[in-house]
Image (cartoon, rainbow, N blue to C red):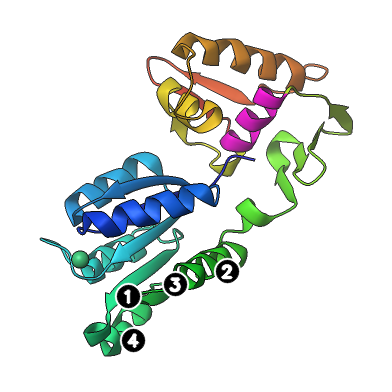
């Protein structure tokens, strides 16, 4: 499985560094933003699986970011965990009312924060914790516990990279991923492979999943990248 991507929105660099280090150790992928404008851009481009959002930020406040993300159709399902200083605790009712999924009061215990993150993923991000991924229109079924894949009634056998690629695409069907994004997520940031390598593995994935002339599951988007066929 591809590890969930968490976006940390926080202007205090030591807090960001500490969170990034510890959450990466937990196996999450991390991006960070130091203000709201940057955060909204990253959300749009990277579709993170969760936001850790500080309340007090320069420019747009954490509360306002939360409101905007929860109002928009594309982003309302991204869970938001808000961070707040003790004095703002009573205001948290407002944050919860506009859709924040949870909050943690600063200074916080890291163990508690990590437990809350896990709970949010269990509760709201079904496809990341589910044992089964399926796309009915493509007749595609993945058992993520057993790492087994079926196309219709036929079980197909994928290599480890192809398997990760497929899970990555299935997490957001219809979304177009660039070769760079695919490399970062499927191979990780410390990889030494060229973007063309993606083409090789996508071709292999396509070939393996194309059972008896079933419809192609991966769409090539010229000069942009690849996407799972969403229709
Ligand atoms: Ca702050």
Res 231 visible: no
Residue 227 appears in the figure: yes
What's the CA distance linking mark 3 and mark 2?
Answer: 10 Å
Tag shown at residue 101: 3
Q: Is residue 174 above or below residue 98?
A: above
Answer with the quadrant where ligand 1 appears in the image.
bottom left
The residue that mark 4 highlights is 93
* Count of labels in the image: 4
Q: Which residue is mark 2?
A: 119
- The residue to which callout 1 is attached is 107
In terms of secondary structure, where does tag 1 sit?
Answer: loop
Whether 165 is among the magenta residues is: yes
- Identify the element where label 4 is drawn: helix
**Position of the N terminus by quadrant:** top right
Instruction: Specify whether tag 4 is near ligand 1 (CB below 8 Å).
Output: no
**Magenta segment main secondary structure:** helix
């Amino acid at each position: 499985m591809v590890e969930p991507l968490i976006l940390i929105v926080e202007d205090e660099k030591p807090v960001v560094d500490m969170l990034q280090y510890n959450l990466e150790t937990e196996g999450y992928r991390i991006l960070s933003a130091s203000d709201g404008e940057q955060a909204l851009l990253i959300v749009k481009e990277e579709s993170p699986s969760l936001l850790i959002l500080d309340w007090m930020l320069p420019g747009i406040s954490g509360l306002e970011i939360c409101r905007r993300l929860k109002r928009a159709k594309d982003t309302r399902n991204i869970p938001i965990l808000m961070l707040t200083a003790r004095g703002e605790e009573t205001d948290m009712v407002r944050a919860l009312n506009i859709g924040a999924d949870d909050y943690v009061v600063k200074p916080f215990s890291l163990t508690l924060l990590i437990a809350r993150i896990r709970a949010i993923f269990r509760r709201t991000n079904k496809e990341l914790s589910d044992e089964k991924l399926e796309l009915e229109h493509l007749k595609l079924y993945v058992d993520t516990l057993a790492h087994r894949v079926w196309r219709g009634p036929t079980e197909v056998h994928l290599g480890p990279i192809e398997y990760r690629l497929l899970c990555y695409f299935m997490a957001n069907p219809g979304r177009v991923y660039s070769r760079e994004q695919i490399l970062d997520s499927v191979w990780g940031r410390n990889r030494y492979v060229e973007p063309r390598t993606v083409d090789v593995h996508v071709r292999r994935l396509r070939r393996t999943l194309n059972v008896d002339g079933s419809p192609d599951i991966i769409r090539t988007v010229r000069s942009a990248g690849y996407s799972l066929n969403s229709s």
